[in-house]
Amino acid sequence: MVNGQGTTVQETVDSHYVNDDGVIHAYPDNRESEYLSESLGLYLEYLLQIEDEENFAKQAAILQERFLIETGGQVFIPWRLYEEANVNALIDDVRIASALEGAAEQFAEPGYLELSRKISSAIEDRQHQGGIAVDYYDWSYQLAGNRLTLSYLIDEMTVLPKSFAMLDAGETEVFFPEYYDFDEKRYVKSDEVHMIDQLLIAVNRYDRGIESPEFENWLIEEWVNQGQVAGRYERETGKPTVGYESLAVYYYLWQYFERIDQSEFAKQAVQRAESLAGEELPGDLHFFDFIHYQMMMDEQ
């Protein structure tokens, strides 16, 4: 796919988002920014989506050479490189494992499936509380985390299926709780909600057959009245707490509107994202926003 001034997305990534070893950093042209397993997973997902076998293979090699750590008979993906990180991140590992599984079939490469199963096995073996997934496993202390962030329960997660029941928090309010605390045995809500999390939870719930009428009605009303969705809102009032918008928010907004059969609103969300992005990409976009935008535009 061509991005901006006749340059492919892959060329933009190579020229602005990677270091000399080919590892993706968070901000364009800033090698001091973080090197995240999140970025790798999202890029694998994008390369699979556009069927770029060559670049997928390069990133899979970087995963094996730079990220994968073998310990205690399992493999572990630190959530960031080059800094002391002894924990992984559930959503990133699930995304990586899912992309590898898809690539094994799409590119007829059985090695990808083997790698996917190794990553999933570590989650299944260590990263849960009573069979319900948790956000991370601390490999230095050999301890599973004590919370499950609901936005992490993406449909691609094939391990620990009991975990999906946690999406039904029994709430009838507009916004969803962010996570479940296993120590306190309760769902936890923040005063300020992040729309990426809220939309991801709404998408996850929809994919599991759980309706979210209060959130859906609020979202449609906000879109009709404002023509935009801010990055964060106050839980109690439903009013924005920030002035900025996010390309990644519009990716998940587009996905959610498509799911609830609001195709016209979905189209408008894409148009809003296009006007925000402009022509000069990547600008100062975090890789998370940059690649979500590209994934959305590829689907148009």
Image: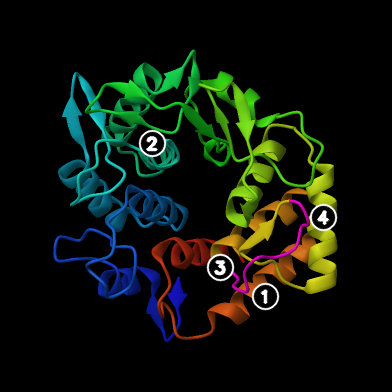
Q: Secondary structure at mark 3?
A: helix
Amino acid type shown at disc 1: Gln
Choose top left, top right, bottom left or bottom right for residue 51.
Answer: bottom left
Kindly identify which residue carries mark 4.
218
* Label 2 – label 3 distance at C-alpha: 25 Å
**Please, what is the three-letter code of the amino acid marked with disc 2?**
Ala
Residue bearing the label numbered 1: 271
For marks 3 and 4, give the CA distance: 20 Å
Q: Nearer the viewer, mark 3 or mark 4?
A: 4
Q: What's the magenta region? A: 236-246
Residue 242: % across, % down:
62, 69
Query: Is 212 situated above or below 147?
Result: below
Query: Which SS class for mark 1?
Result: helix
Q: Are marks 3 and 4 in contact (CB under 8 Å)?
A: no
Pick whichever of labels 2 and 3 is earlier in the sequence: 2
Say whether disc 1 or disc 2 marks the residue closer to the N-terminus: 2
Which residue is located at x 42 percent, y 86 percent? Answer: 5
Q: Is residue 262 visible?
A: no
